[in-house]
Amino acid sequence: MTQETRAPCQLYLISPLDVGGDFPAQLEAALGAGPVAAFQFRVKGIDQHEAARLAAPLQAICATHDTAFIVNDDVALARRLAADGVHLGQGDGDPKEARRILGPDAQIGVTCHGSRHLAMEAGEAGADYVAFGAFYPTTTKTVEHRADPEILTWWQSMFELPCVAIGGITPDNAAMLVEAGADFLAVSGGVWNDPEGAAAAVRRFEKLLAG
């Protein structure tokens, strides 16, 4: 499959760590502003019961907008929620084991930083997509690995498995990653911290991706 025959790049939103308060309304506004392929539920330091409580309204909003609901790091929570999939960091478990637990239809993604080797290993283990980054500075998490956009072009030339670009992506700096070959742009702060609001940010991303 050549890059020319691939589907257009799509938006993949990642939640802020605080998904309480008015966040469900923010998510509703964001998903209503344009097509979003997936939403990753990413919370830290709370028990599974509380995580499930917080996830419930967000999962319902995603279902309404036909947006895949992906759980970050936690296969057990993904199973409890009957989520559409799970995203695994390098220390969060084996894709093969996640597949066994979640079933054949689950979307399983794996963080591969800037490593071709890790990405190939993930593909061999049955991942549905690989994520490369961080491409830009980000305040969402501590950046221990930086990636060059060239890795997206290399991946596209070698493999059919979709690749996700992540890390500090905004409507102003995303074009280079789309041109390099990203199938998805994973965005958190670039949407939720936008001074004009999440919906406005999504509309700007959609204009970029449609162009």
Image: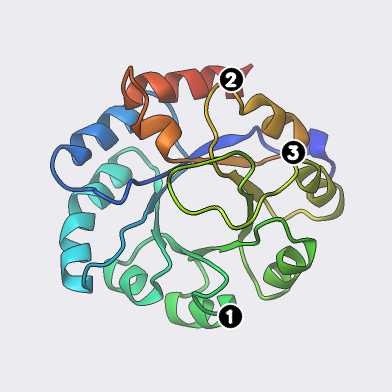
- Which quadrant would residue 114 be assigned to in this image? bottom right
| Residue 195 x/y as whole percent | 33, 20
Foreground mark, 1 or 2, reads 2
The image shows residue 84 at horizontal and vertical percentages of 41, 59
Task: Assess disc 3: are there few (<14), some (14-19) or many (≥20) residues with their C-alpha within 10 Å of its C-alpha.
Answer: many
- Residue 203 appears at what percent x and percent y? 44, 19
Q: Which quadrant of the figure contains the C terminus?
A: top right
Going from N to C along the chain, the mark reached first, 3 or 2, is 3
x then y, percent, for residue 30 = 33, 30
Q: Residue at x 67, y 37 (%)?
A: 7
| Label 2 Cα crowd, 10 Å radius (few <14 / some 14-19 / many 20+) | some
Number of numbered callouts drawn: 3
Mark closest to the chain's N terminus, 1 or 2: 1
In terms of depth relative to the viewer, which is nearer, 132 or 11? 132
Judging by the rendered image, the residue that carries numbered circle 1 is 96
Q: Are marks 1 and 3 in contact (CB under 8 Å)?
A: no
Q: Could you give the CA–CA distance between mark 1 and mark 3, rounded to whole angstroms? A: 26 Å
Amino acid found under the numbered disc labelled 3: Gly
Compare residues 180 and 128 and report the one nearer the observer: 180
Q: Is residue 142 left or right of residue 51?
A: right
Closer to the eye: label 1 or 3: 3
The residue wearing badge 2 is 208
Instruction: Locate residue 15 relative to residue 1 in the image: left or right.
Output: left
Labelled disc at residue 181? 3
- As measured in the structure, the alpha-carbon distance from the residue carrying label 1 to the one carrying label 2 is 35 Å
Q: Is 162 drawn above or below residue 52 in the view shown?
A: above
What amino acid is found at the position of numbered circle 1 in the picture? Lys
The residue depicted at 68 percent of the width and 40 percent of the height is 182
Element assignment for label 1: helix
Vertically, is 156 above or below 115? Answer: above
CB atoms of marks 1 and 2 within 8 Å? no
Q: CA distance from mark 3 to mark 2?
A: 14 Å
